[in-house]
Amino acid sequence: MLDAALAMALAERLSDLIRTLEDIVEEATQPVLDRLRAWLRGQDAAAIGSWQLPVINEARDVDFTSAHRRIRTPQFTMYWRIWEQERP
């Protein structure tokens, strides 16, 4: 069993790793973000207004599992934590 000092040291190292990975991802994706913003600036507002809206599925955070395969169509699922009511 981990003692408190070792657990805290591991948590701090994991936190450092996550921050480092966030920095790497941000640096790697910045050129894509810059190109996307430049492309969007050149788009007509009416054309953008006619784009299909994204499909946003909602589910409770307890419904998030790895038990099912992802669907091929890109979608975004927002998982909500509901404090007032617990599932039976």
Image (tube, helix red, strand yellow):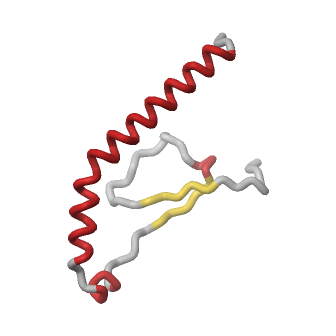
Where's residue 18, x and y in %? 45, 35
4 or 1: which is nearer to us?
Answer: 4
In the drawing, does residue 70 fall left or right of residue 13? left
Image quadrant in which you'd find residue 50: bottom left
Where's residue 64, x and y in %? 55, 47
16 or 2: which is nearer to us?
Answer: 16
Image quadrant in which you'd find residue 28: top left
Q: Determine whether 5 is above or below 71 in the image.
A: above
Residue at 75% in and 53% down: 83
Residue at 61% in and 50% down: 61
Going by the picture, which residue comes out furthest to the bottom?
Answer: 46
Q: How many marks?
A: 0
Where's residue 66, x and y in %? 48, 40
Q: Determine whether 35 is above or below 4 in the image.
A: below
Residue at 62% in and 21% down: 8
Residue at 68% in and 16% down: 4
In the drawing, does residue 83 fall left or right of residue 56? right
Q: Determine whether 67 is above or below 45 in the image.
A: above
Quadrant including the N terminus: top right
